[in-house]
Image: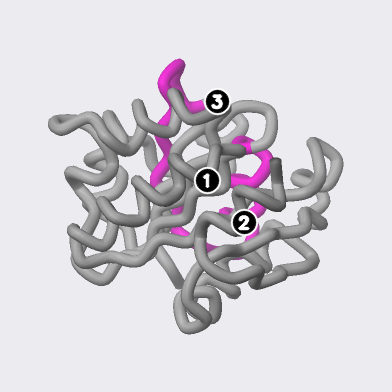
Amino acid sequence: MTTIAFLGLGAMGRRMAVRLLNAQHDVIAWNRTGVPDEVQRAGAKVATSPRTAAAAADVVISMVADDAASAAVWDDPEQGALAGLRLGALAIESSTVTPTRVEALAERVAARGAELLAAPVVGSRPQAESGTLIYLVGGLADAVERATPVLSAMGSAIHRVGPPHTAAVLKL
């Protein structure tokens, strides 16, 4: 069982987090407007910040709106996920962000001794609910392999597309 921090529980994220819980993963959830009841009822633990969620997790997944939201979740020096990211952790940015954002985040994650995968999805709410999202994953092959059991709980296809920024290019 993997402990996963899930950051961003909007229309897509809440469904994805529930899929992880149903697959018997431990999920520590955080959302800027509070963790939805359905995610808590499914068994998620609630974190007070992205930092506290990341500090307790092997894998950290962000599913937020855009570059600005991604920066708010990861980069805040006191409460951001990067501040709590553990050595050897796997950071997965599933948000729709620009290649520039992915490159900057990859550098910062590597500086923390962790690995970044850019893993935007193809699909919407029905696919998130049914676990049939398609992942476009950018990152090292061994990191993609490590992430496969987690991503497979939410998606039906995982396509490694090269370095992290390539996933953002393909998504956009």
Give the residue drawn at x 57%, y 40%: 95
Question: Disc 2 designates what residue?
Answer: 167
The stretch of residues the image draws in magenta is 13-35
Label 1 environment density (alpha carbons within 10 Å; few <14, some 14–19, many ≥20): many
Residue with the mark numbered 3: 36
| CB-based contact (under 8 Å), mark 1 and mark 3 | no
Residue named by callout 1: 99
Q: Give the CA separation, mark 1 to mark 3.
A: 30 Å
Residue 32 part of the magenta segment: yes
Coloring basis for residues: one colour
Vertical arrangement, residue 103 with respect to residue 78, above or below: below
**Mark 1 or mark 3, earlier in chain:** 3
Q: Quadrant of the C terminus?
A: top right
Q: Amino acid at mark 1?
A: Pro
Separation of residues labelled 1 and 2 (CA atoms): 8 Å
Q: Nearer the viewer, mark 1 or mark 2?
A: 1
Q: Amino acid at mark 2?
A: Ala
Which of disc 2 and disc 3 is earlier in sequence? 3
Q: Position of residue 34 (x, y in %)?
A: 44, 20
**For discs 3 and 2, the disc positioned in front in the rendered view:** 2
Q: Secondary structure at mark 2?
A: helix
